[in-house]
Image (cartoon, grey):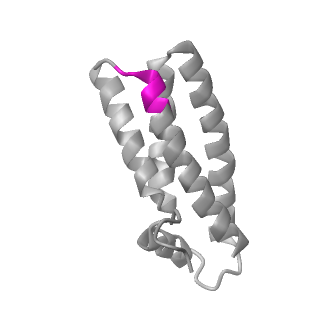
Amino acid sequence: MPTPDEPQLDALAVARLRELDPDGRHGVLQRVLQAFETSLQRQMQLAREARGRDDAAALGGIAHLLKSSSQSVGALALAACCVEIERAVRAGRPVDVSHEVENLLTQAERALVAVRAMLQA
């Protein structure tokens, strides 16, 4: 059982994924979580590279890509972070890329911990 401080995925989102494969025979939840983990690690690296270039447009693209996948697996804090970044970039507002990448990476790390815990369960 996770502690209150341990990152968790939204139970409702996980339940929706389980509904796609109720008996687990096809391993849908495992496959979705593994794909998310792989994609998230890649996007985290791209975010670090965008920070190095101070590239708000690239960060906006990363946020757009991660927004929906994060929501679908229940990484809601990461999804919310992505929404804010994407909105700012699309609106043309000044974006402190370094700060936003740090926020994104913090939430992404928390999501990875939660996903990995579910994959090991």
Question: Relative to residue 117, is residue 18 depicted above or below?
Answer: below
Location of the N terminus by quadrant is bottom right
Q: Residue at x 52, y 62 (%)?
A: 7
Whether residue 60 is visible, yes or no, is no
Give the x, y percent position of residue 2.
55, 75
Task: Identify the magenta region.
Answer: 95-101
Q: Is residue 99 left or right of residue 6?
A: left
Residue 118 quadrant: bottom right
The answer to which of 60 and 77 lies nearer the viewer is 77
Whether residue 54 is visible, yes or no, is yes
Q: Is residue 31 left or right of residue 13?
A: right
Give the x, y percent position of residue 32.
63, 61
Per the image, is 70 magenta? no
The answer to which of 113 and 90 lies nearer the viewer is 113
Location of the C terminus by quadrant is bottom right
Q: Residue at x 51, y 71 (%)?
A: 14
